[in-house]
Amino acid sequence: MAVGKMQAAGRAAKSLTSFDSAQLAWLIISVIGMLPLAVLATLALIILIVIFAMAGGSQMTSTPGSGDSANSTNALIALAGGDGRGTLNVASLPDQDLAAPIRAAARRCDLLTPVIISAQIAYASGFDASKEGPQGREGLSQLTPEVFEEYGEDDDDSGEASVLDAEDSIHAHARYFCHLAAEIDRLIEDEKVVGDHLTLTLMAWEMGLETVEAQGGMPVLALGSYPFQIRGLFAEYTRDGPEESDSTTALPKRAAVQDGPDVEGTELLSESAFSAMFPGRNSFYTYAGLTDAMTKFPAFAGTGDQQTRKRELAAFLANIHHESGGLVHVEEINRDAWGNYCDAAQPYGCPAGQDAYHGRGPIQLSWNTNYQAAGAALGLDLLNEPDLVKNDASVAWQTALWFWMTRSGAGTVTAHDAITGGGGFGETIRTINGALECDGRNTAQVQARVDAYERFTATLDVDPGDEDTLRC
């Protein structure tokens, strides 16, 4: 009897610890079926850990400046797509001519980058400059009329500030973004908001500064929010590799002379780069005319190291861009002022007539005194034949370079010496029009020159120099 019970118990135990083939199959299917749930549970746990880290373990104990918050911010940036500080992938832009204004605009403040601007534009309009959105929003960046009225300017020197002009929209975008960045920085310093600088600035772009401050920033992770959607686009507009070869309008890599100390100015500016700088120029202002004139002034863009030479080239072209409306005007457009440039007290007088010495050429050469001096220096009779400046492209460019290289104007040095001597772009403005624009006068005109200079240094792939040297 006892033996029978023991045998029965053994058989029961065996049935609990062994499986036939059908039972084993069902067990495997059940385990496999539970794998998705296990994966989801793991992901949920990771998200909870990140949320907990972002909140510093407790929203009651976290502070914007704490070390734990900084670490969690770094984790957030990596999780969300980065900080947008990579090299701009120009090939990803639908219109690659936008690369230069995007780069120039992105220099307005440290937080902004070309990748960030590109991602925001892609999200807002898909790079459709004519798009019209809700609340009167228009253009590439879909700025409201109120924002563009405050931050928009005539950045492409077309004669009118328009949100539908790509360049005007991009620079207004940058000015507004940098304003928001400065205000967010203040709120972070005052410990009124929680979150990283870029995320909070993007939040302010989307919902306004007041709302960001009212809700205390972004103390917890919000993956579907505007900042994370923008960050999700960073990868598309970022490429690997150094910035040096990033621009489609940058100068092509040439022979070793390109980097040598004796490179001539004409070697620094390709015809394609020149065309990119002045897309709407008058056909009179030819690349051939410019390079011919440059050979007559070998010290121009031929003095100092490669960086200095490129800066001088960019500074010269930026100033003549401003003076001639983007190389559009060959003669002064205000005909009523044509008779104002004859100094009859000079011994040579005004033999070509009272109205003959108005502005002509890329730097708008004016006054009989300047026509006489330029002609004497260039071996031309410009005093008697001032129209040579509007009829011969090389002569027009030569007069501009003559002024650049030899005249101190309203400054104390020539524009050439201002750049090569380390004075910076601001001192070239002083030389050309300092009496009207420097020392706090006509700041909008000064800014327009600076904007053009920053665009052109970007095209030439050279740093524009210290910020405090850009204005006069």
Image: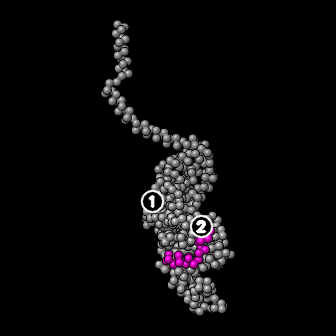
* Residue identifier under label 2: 261
- Where, by quadrant of the figure, is residue 365 drawn? bottom right
Q: Position of residue 204 (x, y in %)?
A: 54, 56
Marks 2/1: CA–CA distance: 35 Å
Residue in front for this viewpoint, 346 or 288: 288
**Type of the residue with mark 2:** Pro
Q: Which comes sooner in the sequence, label 2 or label 1? A: 1
Q: Position of residue 454 (x, y in %)?
A: 56, 67
Residue sitting farthest toward the front = 256
Q: Position of residue 88 (x, y in %)?
A: 50, 59
Q: Position of residue 414 (x, y in %)?
A: 65, 75
- Residue 236 vertical position relative to residue 6 in the rendered view, above or below: below
Task: Work out which quarter of the rendered image holds the C terminus and state it.
Answer: bottom right
Tell me the number on the disc at residue 74.
none
Q: Identify the residue at image location x=32%, y=24%.
A: 20
**Magenta span includes 304:** yes
- Where, by quadrant of the figure, is residue 177 drawn? bottom right
Instruction: Read off the magenta span.
Output: 286-306
| In front: label 2 or label 1 | 2
**Type of the residue with mark 1:** Ser
Residue sitting farthest toward the left = 22
* Residue identifier under label 1: 92
